[in-house]
Amino acid sequence: MEIFLDTANVEDIRRFARLGLIDGVTTNPALIAREGRDFREVVAEICDIVDGPISTEVISLDAATMIEEARMIAKLHPNIVVKIPATKAGYEALNVVSQEGIKVNFTIIYTANQAWLAAKAGATYVSPFVGRLDATSTHGSDLIAEIVQIFEIHGFVTKVLAASMRNEIYVKHAALAGAHIATIPPEVLDAMMESELTDVSLKGFLAEWEKLPREKREYFK
Ligand code: E4P
C-alpha cells in the first residue's frame, strides 16, 4: 500500500519526505486554507518536495466551472491530480476532463456505487472517506473491501485511496482491506512509527550496555 500525506503543511511534507515514506500528497480546500498561504505558492512548494501524485481540489459546484478549474489546476504541474467531489456535477466534470488526459481523484465517496461509477467515468483514484463514515456508525473499512473487490471482479485499474484516516488502526484496516493507497495525516503517521514498548526495550538494552567496562565499549566513544 502506498502512503500519501494528507496535509498542505510543507514542513510536515519535508519532514516525512526525508524519511522516504511519502509517495504522494493529498490536499483539500480546508487543508490549504488552514495554512493561510497563497494557493499556488503552496501547491508549487509541495510539488517541489514530493515527486509523486499531488491531489488538489476544485472548489466550484457546477460542472462547467469544475471543468475550467480542473484544467487550470492540472496546468500547475505534471504531477497534479485534480480532486473532484462525488456529486452529479462532479461525474460530468470527471467524464470531460478524464477524456482530456487529466488525472482525477474522485473524492468524498461514501458508497461502493459512487466508487464504481467514478471508475467507469475514468477516475484515476477514488477516495472513500473512512473516518467520516465510521462517525455515522458504519464500518468504513468494509466499504474499502467492497470497492477493492468490485474493481478486481470487473477489471477496473482505478486505485482505491483510503481517506479520512483518524488513527493508526484505520490505516492498518485499510491495508488489510486491500486499499492501494492510504492518505494519512502527519500526526497519524507520526504515531504509526512508534511504540512505547520499543522505547522501553531500547532503554533496557542501553542500560545493560552501560554495565560493560568503559574500555570495552570505547569503540563508540
Ligand atoms: C483526503 O484526500 C482528504 O483530504 C481527507 O482524508 C479528508 O479527511 P477528513 O477531513 O475527514 O480528515
Image (tube, rainbow, N blue to C red):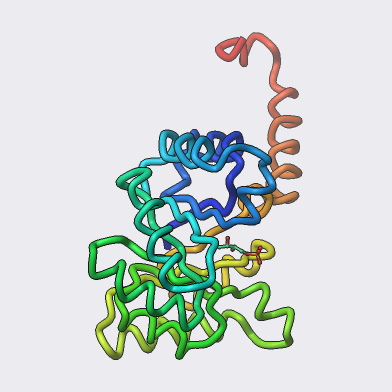
Within the displayed image, which quadrant is ligand 1 positioned in? Answer: bottom right
Image spot of residue 97 (x, y percent): 31, 67
Q: Quadrant of residue 221?
A: top right
Image spot of residue 138 (x, y percent): 67, 87
Q: Nearer the viewer, residue 180 or 104?
A: 104
Q: Farthest residue in the front direction? A: 64
Residue 60's place in the image compared with 50, above or below, is below
Image spot of residue 67 (x, y percent): 38, 65
Q: Nearer the viewer, residue 211 or 55?
A: 55
Residue 104's place in the image compared with 200, above or below, is below
Question: Is 90 left, or right, of 71 in this rendering?
Answer: right
* Image quadrant in which the N terminus is located: bottom left
Question: Is 146 left, or right, of 195 in this rendering?
Answer: left
Q: Nearer the viewer, residue 176 or 110?
A: 110
Residue ID at (45%, 90%):
113
Observer able to see residue 175: no
Residue 90's place in the image compared with 101, above or below, is below
Q: Nearer the viewer, residue 188 or 208?
A: 188
Image spot of residue 104 (x, y percent): 37, 65
Q: Quadrant of residue 153?
A: bottom left
Observer able to see residue 106: yes
